[in-house]
Amino acid sequence: MFIFFWGVIAAYVSVPGEMNTLPESLSIVKSSVYTDIVSAWYATLMILFLSAIGVSLTYLVYFQSGSLSYLFKYSKLTPSKYLMSMFLGGTIAGIVLSLILTYAISGMFSTNGVGYTVMPTKPYVVFPVVILSFLFLISLSFFLFLITMKLGGIKYQQLVNYIPLVLGFIFYSLYTFASSYPEWVTYASPYLNIMCLLFYGYSGNKPPVTVASGINAPTVSVEWSALFLALWTIGLFLGDTLLLRKINYEPIEEAKIM
């Protein structure tokens, strides 16, 4: 509902006003400009949605942690099987929620009086990117929890639960409001890679390094963005598997100390 609220503000308040202020020189390509604006909003709304899901996943692992050490030791459950089941369940739920959000955003931006109907131009790109994004965020959530367990125990977990969402806001702000920054920053950040890939899948155009740089902004390589996002996900998955093998029982009541 938080994302829907900002979608309504963007579709019915912010973007129509922005379109009315476009110079006459852009009237010929107004439809293309509008698609890019909507794509930028779609990418930023989705990254906030995915980041919020990351917080939920961190809490999920947090509440399951008490039984994992026993299950790995006395049952046939292995860390890799556990991670794969979490990936499968989280991705299925994520696809359903992402479909609802995608078509809700498209509907709002198509019925706001601007006069254009917008839908993802490359849905065969958007939804694989959403799946890969969920896999990354599940891996990140597990890693944050497990590394906290190894370094300080479960009592420090409350300090890191919201890191996925905080990172989402940081990189959303960078992509939306920063006038410029080096291209390598995009490839180094999985959050920026996700936004660039979602922009590309929705608009069909090469994503800009930052949407605040305006027309003729330098663009990002879609192939490199996808590669670096996949590498981040694989690296975190391998780290999760290793850390899960060494997980110890921590009474969840210890978190109340904080």
Image: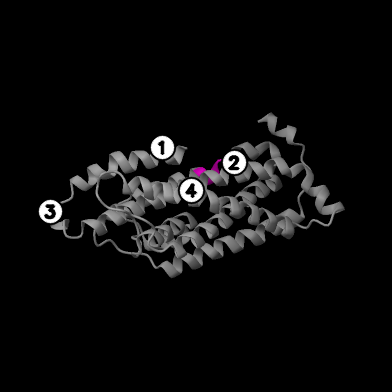
How much space separates mark 3 and mark 4, taking CA atoms? 36 Å
Residue 161 has which mark?
A: 2
Distance of label 1 from label 4 (alpha carbons): 14 Å
Disc 1 vs disc 4: which is toward the camera?
4
Q: Is residue 218 visible?
A: yes
In the structure shown, which secondary structural element does the residue marked by tag 3 occupy?
A: helix
**Amino acid found under the numbered disc labelled 4:** Ile
Image mark for residue 5: 1
- Neighbour tally class for label 1: few under 14, some 14-19, many 20 plus, Cα within 10 Å: few
Please rate how many residues cluster around mark 3, counting C-alpha atoms within 10 Å: few if below 14, some from 14 to 19, many from 20: few
Amino acid type at mark 2: Asn
Residue 24: assigned label: 3
Q: Amino acid at mark 1?
A: Phe
Crowd band around label 4 with a 10 angstrom C-alpha radius: few (<14), some (14–19), many (20+): few
- Outermost residue to the left: 24
In magenta, the rendered stretch is 161-165
Residue under the point 13% across and 57% down: 25
Residue placed at 23% from the left, 45% from the top?
18
How far apart are the alpha carbons under marks 1 and 3?
31 Å
Instruction: Give the x, y percent position of residue 122.
Output: 41, 64
Reply above or below: 133 against 157.
below
User: Toward which corner of the image does residue 210 lie, by quadrant?
Assistant: bottom left
Local SS, label 4: helix
First reached walking from the N terminus: tag 4 or tag 2 = 4
Q: Residue furthest top?
A: 257
Front label number (3 vs 4): 4
